Image (cartoon, rainbow, N blue to C red):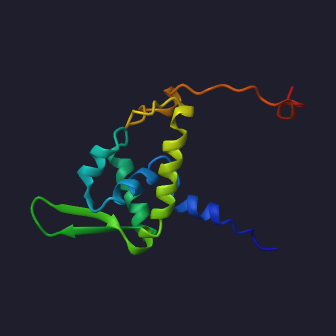
Amino acid sequence: MGEFFCPVKLTTNVIGGKWKPLILFYLEGGTLRFGELQKLIPGMTKKMLTQHLRDLERDEVVRRKVYAVVPPKVEYSLTRHGESLKPILKLMSAWGTKHRTRYGIPKGQVHAPQSFASARRPTAPVPAVLTNGLG
């Protein structure tokens, strides 16, 4: 029997993770240089940004354009294939805006805390059905 194909798994393989959705969100607004992306995503190392941009380029979601000038100039933008992700990014943005107070981010705050782990998360009791037989 063949392996089950899950479209959500495919999508998360291409755009999932901690940093790729942020990269795509900012590139949705237009072409950006490496340094601009780096400033927009604090906490992401240069190495991680480089790796994720390479992954997105390999998957034909992001286009890398190199200019033959000194100092080197490299720009990143969404490909046509990458543009097809805009509805998903808009829905993710709307969901995050709607539910941010649940995760400890005040309505007026534009930028999230450096780490969501440091954000106040409400605690809810774990339903008994989930804890039965666990010890």
Residue 77 place in picture, x, y as percent: 32, 65
Residue 83 place in picture, x, y as percent: 41, 69
Vertical placement of 22 versus 119: above or below? below
- Compare residues 109 and 1 and report the one nearer the observer: 109
The residue at the point 11 percent across, 66 percent down is 69
Residue 132 place in picture, x, y as percent: 89, 31
Vertical placement of 121 versus 24: above or below? above
Tell which residue pokes out farthest to the left in this image: 70
The residue at the point 75 percent across, 25 percent down is 125
In the rendered image, which quarter is residue 55 located in? bottom left
* Left/right of residue 65 with respect to residue 121 in the rendered view: left
Vertical placement of 113 versus 79: above or below? above
- Compare residues 95 and 80 and report the one nearer the observer: 95
* Left/right of residue 103 with respect to residue 113 in the rendered view: right
The residue at the point 25 percent across, 50 percent down is 36
Tell which residue pokes out farthest to the right in this image: 133
Q: Quadrant for the N terminus, please.
A: bottom right
* Left/right of residue 60 with respect to residue 73 in the rendered view: right
In the rendered image, which quarter is residue 82 located in? bottom left
Q: Quadrant for the C terminus, please.
A: top right
The residue at the point 35 percent across, 44 percent down is 41
In the rendered image, which quarter is residue 67 located in? bottom left
Residue 93 place in picture, x, y as percent: 47, 50
